[in-house]
Amino acid sequence: MTQINPMAPVMVTGATGYLAGHVVKQLLEAGHTVHAPVRSPDNADKLKYLNAIAAGTQGQIKYFKADLLDEGSYNEAMAGCELVIHTASPFFLKVKDPQKDLIEPAVNGTRNVLNAVNATDSVKRVVLTSSMAAIYTDNTEIAKKPGGVLTEEFWNETASLTHSPYAFSKKLAEQEAWKMMKAQDRWDLVTINPSFLLGPGISPETQGESYSVMTQFGDGQLATGVPDFRVGVVDVRDVAMAHVRAGFTPAAEGRHITSGYDSGFPEMAKMLRDEFGDKYGIPKSTAPKFLIWLFGPMINAALTRTVVSRNVGVDFKADNSKSVRELGMEYRPMETTLVEHFQDLVDSGRIKAK
Ligand code: NAP
């Protein structure tokens, strides 16, 4: 049982990111003081949305300069914190140098943050943002699991520098965190393992993989047909809440699959079409698998033929019951997430009517 003093500051890494923006927002709304180590604390433009949220709440935010790759750079921000929420990690599906662009910041960054935890006596709990990608690599693995469903007991086994390197980075980073937690007994570790995050960010300038996929549902890129990627979908605001609850629930322990719905791209397109009709370039049909296999690698380097063969049209199934039982999660309807996310892209001018 780990009791966190709500008056102590909470450190959140990656506060400028999509997910962490909501984590920080929820902490500020609950009146906490947030210590936010960011790469560019002097970039007022990048921090204006977080500052506007802070100005409208009882909470306070303080910025510090830190980089996942700079050893010791998190020590100052962590001073006096009992709870550390470590979300920062590069999330790119297309990378030139997976070792340098993904593995090093994810793994060395986690080690760097946890070395600071080891050096900061006040810290009692670390909540780490891992991923479903640390649990499985390809959908073809899922049917072979007991009951054909993913649970917290699994780790991806086939991700590597050349196949799904992002999943590889998330597994290595989470395993490093568990190793460092087990080597001491002052702080404990709780991980949040989300599926694909969707839903509006805290600012109209939010970027990243989640935004880029949602944009493709409306800008006509998938007009010839949506690939039948079968994925877990979860609202970014629900996952932010899971982080806060994981921090302040004394009995929270271990890993937590945070995935609202077992779904897929065709269902997402249908839900969006039901709401927005034909006004935007929302796909109307599903692309045949052989066409994606043939042309995918030319359109997107991450869409290798192995990725297409093992994932397109192959079901995704995950058990989120631990998050419901232990963190009290209630996942908002998927339609709400999709419609609000799409509307955010329309409002910010990134998706235009045909
Ligand atoms: P995001 O918007 O790209 O945020 C990533 C954050 O990490 C940014 O604040 C970025 O800072 C920071 N960062 C990256 N490299 C850094 C470095 N070298 N030093 C310091 N900070 C660095 O991504 P996100 O979608 O919110 O993802 C956040 C976390 O959720 C990641 O751990 C990701 O693996 C995990 N996750 C995401 C999804 C999803 O669908 N989006 C699903 C499961 C898990 P800058 O602003 O300075 O670039």
Image: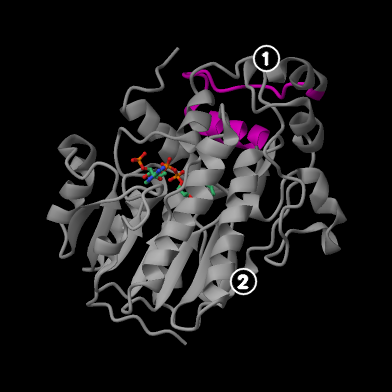
Tell me if residue 44 is in the magenta stretch.
no
Image coords of residue 191 (percent x, y): 53, 65
Label 1: state its secondary structure: helix
Q: Is residue 138 left or right of residue 208?
A: right
- Please state the extent of the stretch shown in magenta in the rendering: 265-289
Image coords of residue 263 (percent x, y): 66, 45
Image coords of residue 128 (percent x, y): 48, 62
* Figure quarter occupied by ligand 1: top left
As displayed, is residue 328 above or below residue 75?
below
Image coords of residue 8 (percent x, y): 24, 75
Label 2: state its secondary structure: helix
| Residue at the outermost front position | 71
Instruction: Tell me the amino acid under the disc marked 2.
Output: Lys
Of 172 and 27, nearer the camera is 172
**What residue do we see at 51% from left, 78% from top?**
252
**What residue do we see at 53% from left, 31% from top?**
213
Tell me if residue 284 is in the magenta stretch.
yes
Residue 328 in sight in this render: no
> Within the image, what quadrant is residue 163 found in?
top right
Given this view, does label 2 or label 1 mark the residue nearer the observer? 1
**What residue do we see at 76% from left, 44% from top?**
139
Instruction: Tell me the amino acid under the disc marked 1.
Output: Met
**What residue do we see at 59% from left, 47% from top?**
169
- Which label was assigned to residue 298? 1
Q: Which residue is mark 2?
A: 322
As displayed, is residue 74 above or below residue 179?
above
